[in-house]
Image (tube, helix red, strand yellow):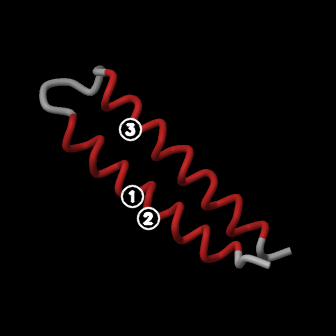
Amino acid sequence: MRNPRLFSLLYFVLGSMFTYLAIESAHETVWNVSTIALAALAAFDFGTALRLLFASKR
C-alpha cells in the first residue's frame, strides 16, 4: 500500500512549482493563457494534496 502522505507532499511541491512558474510568466498581465493554465494546475495540485492529506487521517 502506498502512503497517501508521500503523495500529498509530492502534489504540494508540484503545486508550489506551478505557482512559481505562473508568477514568473505574468509579465504584463495575468490574463494570458500560460498564466491561467499554470494557476489552474497549481490549484488542482493543492486540492489533491489536501484531499490526500485529510484522507490519510481517517
Residue at which label 1 appears: 16
**Residue plotted at (39% across, 58% down):** 16
Tell me if label 1 and label 3 are in contact, CB under 8 Å: no
As drawn, which residue projects farthest toward the front? 1
- Asked which secondary structure carries label 1, the reply is helix
Instruction: Give amino acid for label 3.
Output: Leu
Q: Secondary structure at mark 3?
A: helix
Which sits earlier in the primary sequence, circle 1 or circle 3?
A: 1
Distance of label 1 from label 3 (alpha carbons)? 11 Å
In this picture, residue 5 sits left or right of residue 21 = right
The disc placed on residue 41 is: none
Sequence-wise, which precedes: disc 2 or disc 3?
Answer: 2
Decide which of 57, 5 is in the foreground and name it: 5
Amino acid tagged 2: Val
Q: Which residue is mark 2?
A: 13
**As shown in the figure, which amino acid type bears the numbered disc 1?**
Ser
User: The N terminus appears in which quarter of the rendering?
Assistant: bottom right
CA neighbours of label 1 inside 10 A, class few (<14), some (14 to 19), many (20+): some
User: In the rendering, which numbered label is found on residue 38?
Assistant: 3
Element class at badge 2: helix
Q: Is residue 49 left or right of residue 55?
A: left
Look at the numbered discs 1 and 2 and tell me whether their residues touch, using CB distance below 8 Å: yes
User: x, y percentage for residue 30?
Assistant: 27, 27
